[in-house]
Amino acid sequence: MPRPARRFVACILPVLTFFPSPAMLPRATPFLIGLLGLSALAGHAQQLNTAKLDSLLNALDANHKMMGSLALAHDGQVVYRRAFGEARLAPGAPATPNTRYRIGSITKVFTGVMIFQLIEEKKLTLETPLATFFPQVPGAAAITIDQLLSHRSGLHNFTTDPAFPAFMVQPHTQAELVALIAGPPPDFAPGAKFAYSNSNFVLLGYIVEKLTKMPYPQALQKRVLARAGLKNTFYGGKINPQAQEALSYEWGPGGWKLAPETDMSVPAGAGALVSTPTDLARFFEALFGGKLVAASSLAAMQTLRDGYGRALFATAVGPQQSFGHNGHNGGIDGFRSAAGYFPAAKLAVAVCSNGVAGSYSPDQLLADAARSYFGQPFKIPSFKTFTPAATDLDRYPGTYASPGFPLKITVVKAGAGLTAQASGQGPLPLEAVGPGAFTFDPAGIRMEFDAAQPTFTLTQGGATHVFAKE
């Protein structure tokens, strides 16, 4: 059973991914397995700064910050791929660029594609009510397919339930998952606002099954994988390292330790897929190349409200805009993934990781890899450890609130660091990154305390809130 700290599956702001990070344990003297990887493939992208990108991955390895795999593809051709860090498939077994990883919420894009295919086949519309399929869900008559795709349904995110850590490691039926989703009252009226909820895409995955009259894995194979030519993407089950499926890890005393394993009946269409960075790059190339949905459907997926389209996030690297699940990475157990496509440059970038420790995330790696391709400057982090003074840490504990923010945040001194706990959620271990500045990077959280008054500024998901101590 997971430790209690794994409860914060929604984190402070509800813009996280499927199963955000477990607690990052205190760093201890690690053991070095060594860098494993493939050199960058021969230079098809003259703009790609291969040497600097290699140096960045070497720095992640040397400082035990991340292990996994990275791929870049331009106009249908892979131009870089490498397994990096203390890359391992299983204890004692090295990973390669062909190693397969759980990709968490990037699954949502695959589910969204199949929903739009069904819309094109006139089996449903964006305005079809959820009640057509699941009338037992509260407010289902007023919730539309559009609102499910765009996280505007108001359905409570079932992964925030306090009992979820025990629930997630056991197999469950569709009926049990629907009952869990249907239990809590809605968080807000359908269409009123955006709030990320895994419940939306679990239900969408079940709708795919109902309309195709086949299990999700079979529908996925027929409608997406075969069309895109993906050989290393599939609906996950029990992790099998013998089949090149990676286990996931957490950083703790003594180095990397195995993370718990979610039963894949639970994330379903919201987070149950396994893939490789190369396959993810090919998937996004197929999506934007017209192989999976019509141009009108792709345009609808890219139509943004509150920074989110329909199953797609939009982010920018300099002047270049990308669409995918970067900026809102795919997380499940110890896995973290990010993938995005830059339409103007015909560039796809994907990162899959099975171990992240500290303040550098797959989202950041994706952005820096794109910068290396576009010839934009980026800095290789020094990863120097910042140790705050004990007298400074004594100033921060307390309960803080912000006008218009629905949750209070309690800050507690924990050993030589801090934890932050939002109302109804588990504590997050914060990493000190500078005077008064702390982060929990797996959730994209940064908290900066004001030295002159008892306040802090919270930044997450592009939003900023000022909290004052009560």
Image: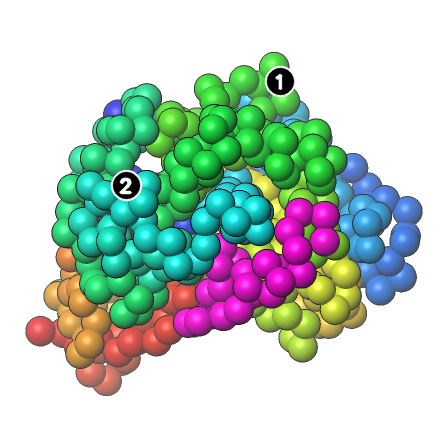
Q: Amino acid at mark 2?
A: Phe
Residue 436 in sight from this viewpoint: no
The quadrant of the image that shows the N terminus is top left
Q: Quarter-wise, where is residue 318 in the image?
A: bottom right
Establish if 18 lies above or below 141.
above
Q: Amino acid at mark 1?
A: Ala
Q: CA distance from mark 2 to mark 1?
A: 36 Å
Residue 148 image offset from top left, x and y in percent: 37, 54
For disc 2, the marked residue is 134
Residue 164 included in the magenta stretch of the image:
no
Residue where numbered disc 1 is placed: 243
Residue for point 37% across, 41% down: 202
Which numbered mark, 2 or 1, is in the foreground of this view?
A: 2
Magenta range is 290-314
Side of 174 relative to 271 (left or right): left
Q: Which quarter of the picture shows residue 320?
A: bottom right
